[in-house]
Image (tube, helix red, strand yellow):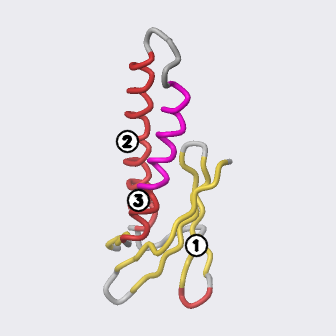
Amino acid sequence: MYRVVVTEEVHNSIKSFIDSYRNTFLSLFSDTWIFDEELIRNHYIHSSEKFQSELFNLIEESLKYDIVFWRKEMQNSYFQLITDIWNYKLFLHYSEDNKNKIRCLEDLELHKK
């Protein structure tokens, strides 16, 4: 099994995406005069936290095994893996060190399906 390393840039990118995801929904339910508005807002907050957790778990699960199916070799020894999460396509761009069994996630993209 490989050890998966996520760069600081990718961490920040995920955090930024999740913040935007959460704020988009929270802005829809601010000052709506709906009786359970706070309940709805809390649900979206919880949902965004769950999404972030599942995103990191998927990255780990996708890259930790010795053989990564469906990967595409890119330039300069980089690889790309495309997978699904919720209603998004997730593009993982990573490098690997076979000697030390480390995969480093260099970049990721999330695109709405």
Instruction: List the single residue furthest toward the front.
Output: 31
Query: Going 53% across and 73% down the picture, which residue do you hit?
Result: 93
Secondary element at image label 1: strand
Label for residue 80? 1
Secondary element at image label 2: helix
Q: Residues within 10 Å of mark 3 (few under 14, many from 20)?
A: few
Classified by dominant secondary structure, the portion drawn in magenta counts as: helix
Query: Going 38% across and 67% down the picture, which residue do you hit?
Result: 64
The residue that label 2 is drawn on is: 49
Instruction: List the single residue furthest toward the right.
Output: 113
Circle 2 or circle 3, nearest the eye: 2
Front-most of residues 20 and 77? 20
Mark found first going from the N terminus, 3 or 1: 3
Figure label count: 3
Residue 1: x and y in percent read 34, 71
What is the spatial separation of the Cα atoms under label 1 and label 2, in whole angstroms? 26 Å
Q: Is residue 25 magenta?
A: yes
Amino acid of disc 2: Glu
Q: Is residue 68 above or below residue 101?
A: above
The residue that label 3 is drawn on is: 61
Residue 19: x and y in percent read 44, 47
